[in-house]
Amino acid sequence: MAVSEFPLPDVGEGLTEAEIVSWKVAPGDEITVNQVLVEIETAKSLVELPSPFAGTVQKLLVEEGATVEVGTPIISVQSVGGSVELTAPGSGEDESHGLMSDVGSEAGAASSAASSAADDAAAAVADTASTIANEDDKPGAVLVGYGTGGHVSSRRRKGGQPAKADATATATSASKPRPASVPASFASPIIAKPPIRKLAKDLGVELAEVAATGLAGETTREDVIRHASQASVFRNIETPAWGDEREERIPVKGVRKAIAKAMVHSAFTAPHVSVFTDVDATRTMEFVKRLKNSPDFAGVRVSPLLIMAKAVNWAVRRNPTVNSSWTDKEIIVHHYVNLGIAAATPRGLIVPNIKDAQDLSLFDLAKALEQLTLTARDGKTQPAEMSNGTITITNIGSYGMDTGTPIINPGEAAIVALGSIKQKPWVVDGEVRARYVTTVSASFDHRIVDGDVASRFVADLASVLEEPALLLD
């Protein structure tokens, strides 16, 4: 048995690095094909990397919390069946993927399980996984799911320049018989890249049951989605067996009762009006990446939600009536921002808020958001932390949703919804380019906020997402 190293792949849009969030395996663990090895975070999303091979974990080469460049070895494994190399797929070309590349972009709710990494990482391993032994072309087995039966050298030359595909060499290599040392389980490998495996896992699809249509026999994203849509009309949920009773009765109490009362009161008291706009958030994604790499933001979580939170503070100053309350006798315009963040918890939806968010620096706001999230996740949010909110953000993009019409949190005049950020075709200077696009929507209490104010407020939010430098004003 040989020890091989697994390099960090490019999981989409040519990203150059990622953070190791959490290891799912430990030294000495026996791992199987498609088992999740590690969870990483890119500038766009959290991604689980599955194992393309079976073996025994020898060493974790990178600690949790570390940010490493693409191509850096992150784990060593004693593989089954002799020397194993990470190689590029034998098609010689990247699998073609559309630009509509995130959760919810096609096949209805089925694709909501496909994160942006699942759509845009066409060359997840092919562009970054190099032969462990050296860069020379020499025969060797490939890891199951990461290539064909013959050796194909990495399509990245030293210096980052793509290498030209050698069709003759590929055909000759592919025609060679498999080494006798390769186990029988390698005889008919499931060829699918990590994002495709992640998509299949999220949709509950067994890759062995999917009819592969890729040119080199690989399973494509469309194959998985088609198989899932044929299997069931339901998405993103398990389908448990019914109990013996014909009906189940759940008492309405606690958080669920409070949620129901608040939502009914808001929906039937405040006349809602909603507006939407699409935004080129490419510079926001670049800004988030720079913040993550900045020593000043070391140890704190940074995401597009942080930029949206700062944008709300900025836009409220320009449109103060959206940060108001209605009392029947008067409108109270708040000259401070207690910024609510809608949080889904095991106990139900809660909306804790960050007090006096307008006074916080970008770094302090990031820390406050992180603490709010952790407290809510642990079920330790106190009533005082959910009272006296003035305006709320709901990050529906974290669930893969593009947009929605949120219900205003009672006592407030506006709620903002941030949709998923995905690559789409976008016209820039008369040319169609791939850009990170999101949809910003907001609902308002029409007793307080008129259409022109609502539109200006959302336009201001869009302006910041398009150009975060406005936050420096």
Image (cartoon, rainbow, N blue to C red):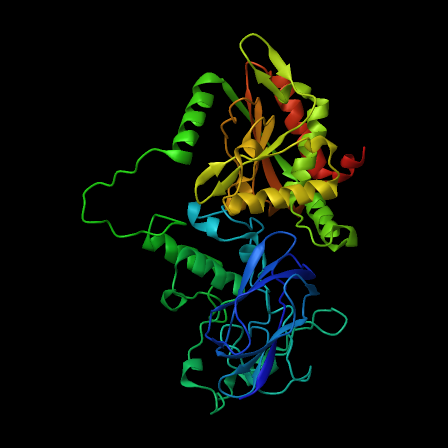
Point out residue 267 in the picture as x, y percentages from the top left corner.
45, 22
Vertically, is 148 above or below 222?
below
Residue reaching furthest to the right: 473
Observer-nearest residue: 129 or 378? 378
- Residue at 18% x, 43% y is 246
Q: Residue 42 falls in which quadrant of the image?
A: bottom right
Observer-nearest residue: 168 or 385? 385
Vertically, is 363 above or below 277?
below
- Residue at 50% x, 53% y is 114
Asked if residue 139 shows in the view, the reply is yes
Q: Residue 205 falls in which quadrant of the image?
A: bottom left
Point out residue 16 in the picture as x, y percentages from the top left corner.
70, 61
Vertically, is 291 above or below 50?
above
Vertically, is 152 above or below 318?
below
Residue reaching furthest to the bottom: 180
Asked if residue 427 shows in the view, the reply is no
Q: Is residue 371 left or right of residue 79?
A: right
- Residue at 41% x, 56% y is 203
Point out residue 187 in the picture as x, y percentages from the top left corner.
43, 82
Residue reaching furthest to the top: 329
Observer-nearest residue: 3 or 22? 22
